[in-house]
Amino acid sequence: MTTNEDREDAVAILNWEGTNEIRSANDYGRSLLFSVLDSLEGSVTIVWDRDRSVMHRVNLFAGASVLAAHGVVANHTIETKNTVTTPHVVFFLAPTMTSLDLLCDYMDNVPNDSKVLYQVFFIPEAWYVVRESLKLRSEGKYWERLESVKEIPLCWLPREGECLSLSNPQIASRLLINGDWTHLHKCAVALNQLVDMCRGRSTSNQRPISILAKGKWATDVARMMQKVRSAVETDHVSKSADPVDGLLKINRIVLIDRWLDPLTPMLTQLTFSGLLDEVYGVGMMNSVKVPEAEFDESNDGDPFKEKEISLIDEVYHRLKHSHINAVSIESSKILSELRDDEQYDRENMSVAEYSVLVRKMPKILNKKKVINIHMRLAQMIRSHLYCKLSDSVKTARELLDSSDSDRAITFIEDEVFDAAPLNGVLRLISVHSLTCGGLKPSVLQHYRRIVNQSYGSSALNKILKMQKMGLIREKGGGGKMLCEYAPMMFQQNKKSYDMLPDTVNEEKLNDISYAYSGFAPLLCKMLEEGDRVKWTGWKKTIIGDDSDPMSENDMRGTCVFVIGGLTRSELAIIRENIPNVALITTSALITGDKLLDNITNI
């Protein structure tokens, strides 16, 4: 047992709880939240929006017990319309007209004492239209009743302990279908918050940060970042709460467009975390909900009852980036460590050794429980992959190797005629189109016709939106369905970036093609190349005085921001293959299904 006593788990715990950069960003978010609550004298009742994402966003930084330590004595939902006994009522609302209607309805129908002070905080931003509507509604009656209306910019949400997300999966569809550039402005505002975390707001002792951009959206965001920095709103909550400014050790921020590579999200992810997201969906609280009967392997259970499983633990941290076919290898290592930990000689143990064992035993037992849970999850998603997705994965691989725009794919036709899940069918049609540089008009018309026959007009409408986004293109096509974003040019990029290497090792995380079994995502290859050539050829903007050449020469401390979303498998590739990247950020962690579901809602 001596060797195991010497092997402490502190480093592993530190890693799965988050990198230094993630923990610094979390501290920043908590400081914004606590500065609001601590500024109020007396006890507080929080009234939560009907939109559960607001509560989930706040709970990522502080749970109920932590909020209670900062004066919160009661939590109500806005629809219950309960009266309060505290001197302060704090409304945490999403910046939507629906939330504004609920606020006004609450104020009309809840007979709180007139001395109770109402404070409204929009999370993560106070949208100008909502704010102005509140001012003008009922000739300012509601506005006058409010003590303050501000925002708490909890923009960056922790993901996987090594990624920050804006949790905005609609950016690509809003930009390409609606032309709504305000989403790029939101990215610029959030990125400037990251800059503040790196440099601090104080004008003294600031160091410059390079912004490097590749892609149309990235260039626009870099330009907006400069404009936003000179026009921060005076009532921005974060101006008065910067106790952790300058804690992030970032030398440069690299911006890249998702739509330089729209193909990869259409493919099935094959890492443990990626496949979990594909099959069950990983929620905002870093957990998955699976059918309880399936998890328990019970034939008598309620088929609709779900079991929520947290993904915040050391075992998941060690398994998440593994290829699904290699999860058993890493699991075996963990089980071997547990067996070593349980080997002890009670007859010859000293009191000190007993004391160490007693302290470690709860951790060992919990680790055994957690490894069993994750091994069962891996078994479930692997079964799903080989029973339901294997033919789709095989067809996509054949299209990556060789794609013909002149004929429809038989497997896609069969899936449509069998009324297979629509998103899976549309993803394959998209892969067909993107890999061959656009479909022949007769082939595209054939796909449209059979999809309309099997799934109805709503599915046909989805195809048209995919055309507008460039996920499906018609050779020689134009007009209203022409995507404004330049095509991917897969065949040329496949050769120049070696996206289909001759050999692949699914067990090696430093094989850039491992996460997709022999396919190297273009976005990851572009980032790898940029890091290798010190970002030569990328559009560069300097924020601050360009007088610190040391940070330019130090290639470490790179922050990557992907505009339009990043898959968990791509996250794994970047983390494992580009060591100079200290922080990975994105507008959202996505799958092909999530991307297509957001098209439906537009």
Image (cartoon, rainbow, N blue to C red):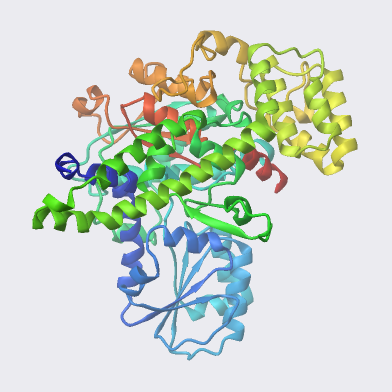
Q: Can residue 271 be seen in this view?
A: yes
Above or below — where is 71 with respect to 515?
below
Q: Residue at x 45, y 47 (%)?
A: 372
Relative depth, front residue between 251 and 448: 448
Q: How many marks?
A: 0
Relative depth, front residue between 264 and 6: 6
Q: In the image, residue 488 lies at what x, y percent?
A: 61, 20
Left or right: 186, with 200 as reference point: right
Left or right: 199, with 376 as reference point: left
Above or below — where is 277 with respect to 57?
above
Q: Which residue is drawn at 25% across and 29% down?
A: 546
Tell me where residue 162 sits by quadrant.
Answer: top left
Left or right: 143, with 302 as reference point: left
Above or below — where is 371 with respect to 407?
below
Q: Which residue is drawn at 64% across and 31% down?
A: 386
Q: In the image, residue 119 lies at what x, y percent?
A: 44, 74
Relative depth, front residue between 117 and 493: 493
Relative depth, front residue between 349 and 406: 349
Q: Can residue 39 be seen in this view?
A: no
Q: In the image, residue 24 lies at what x, y percent?
A: 29, 48
Looking at the figure, which quarter contains the N terminus? top left
Q: In the image, residue 376 lies at what x, y percent?
A: 52, 45
Tell me where residue 62 sits by quadrant.
Answer: bottom left
